[in-house]
Image: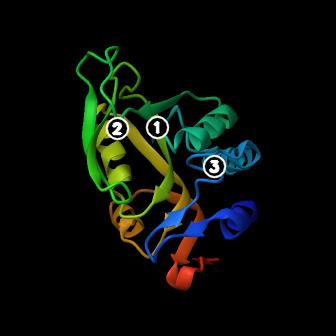
Amino acid sequence: MEALHKKIREEGVVLSDQVLKVDAFLNHQIDPALMKLIGDEFAALFKDSGITKIVTIEASGIAPAIMTGLNLGVPVIFARKQQSLTLTENLLSATVYSFTKKVESTVAISPRHLTSSDRVLIIDDFLANGKASQALISIIKQAGATVAGLGIVIEKSFQGGRAELDAQGYRVESLARVKSLSGGVVTFIE
C-alpha cells in the first residue's frame, strides 16, 4: 500500500534496528485520511471472508479496526487492557507481553460480544513477534468463534510473528512489510 509506505518513509522514526516509531500518524496522533485508506484496503482484502466481527487490542488497533468495520458493516470489539467496573462477568482473557513497553498485560473481552457463530477478523497496528495476535486468537477460540484472518497495518517481517501464524494456518494480510530497520532506514518487502 503505497500511501502507507510513503507515510512511514516521511514520518516514521527508526529508534533502533527493532523499533519503528509511527506516533505521528498511527498510534498517538492519528491520520484519519490514512486510516480510511487502510480500512478500505482491509475491507477489499477480506470482503469475501464472511466476517461478522472485528477484534483488536486497545488502543493502537482501534482506528484501523473501526475504519475496516465501517467498510464491512460489522461491529468492532477491542480487547481491554485495564479491568473496568463495568466488566464484571466471566471475561474471555489472555496475557500478552509488549516488546516496546516491556510489560505483560491481561487483555479481555466480554463473552456477550463474541459467539461461536462469529467469523472474526483481527486487526492490529503491528505484527512483530506475534504475541498480541496469539492472545487475540486465544480469546476468539475461548468464545468458540472462528479466526477468518489477520489484517496488520505494519509487519516487522524480520521478527518471527508471521512465520508462527503462517505455520498455524492463519491468513495474514499486511499492508506494509518491513524487511529491515538497519542503519536507521526502513526497507520494505515489495
Measured along the vertical axis of the image, is residue 142 above or below residue 125? above
Q: List the residue tagged with mark 2.
A: 140
As measured in the structure, the alpha-carbon distance from the residue carrying label 1 to the one carrying label 3 is 13 Å
Q: Amino acid at mark 2?
A: Ile
**Secondary structure of the residue carrying numbered label 3:** helix
Quarter of the view holding residue 161 = bottom left
Q: Which mark is residue 98?
A: none
Q: Are the residues flagged by discs 1 and 3 in contact, CB closer than 8 Å?
A: no
What is the crowding at mark 2: few (fewer than 14 residues within 10 Å), some, or many (at least 20)? many
Q: List the residue tagged with mark 1.
A: 55
Looking at the picture, tell me which residue is in the foreground, 47 or 156.
156
Which residue is painted at 48% across and 39% down in the image? 59
Which residue is painted at 31% across and 31% down in the image? 143
Looking at the picture, tell me which residue is in the foreground, 104 or 43.
104
First of labels 1, 2 by sequence position: 1
Q: Residue 174: where, in percent of width, then height?
A: 56, 61
Measured along the vertical axis of the image, is residue 124 above or below residue 54? below
As measured in the structure, the alpha-carbon distance from the residue carrying label 1 to the one carrying label 2 is 9 Å
First of labels 3, 2 by sequence position: 3
What is the crowding at mark 1: few (fewer than 14 residues within 10 Å), some, or many (at least 20)? many
The reply, left or right, for residue 1 in relation to residue 150 is right
Q: Amino acid at mark 3?
A: Phe
Quarter of the view holding residue 24 = bottom right
How many marks the image carries: the answer is 3
Measured along the vertical axis of the image, is residue 109 above or below residue 127? above
Q: Are the residues flagged by discs 1 and 2 in contact, CB closer than 8 Å?
A: yes
As measured in the structure, the alpha-carbon distance from the residue carrying label 3 to the one carrying label 2 is 19 Å
Residue at the bottom extreme?
A: 183
Q: List the residue tagged with mark 3.
A: 42
Q: Amino acid at mark 1?
A: Val
Discs 1/2, front: 1
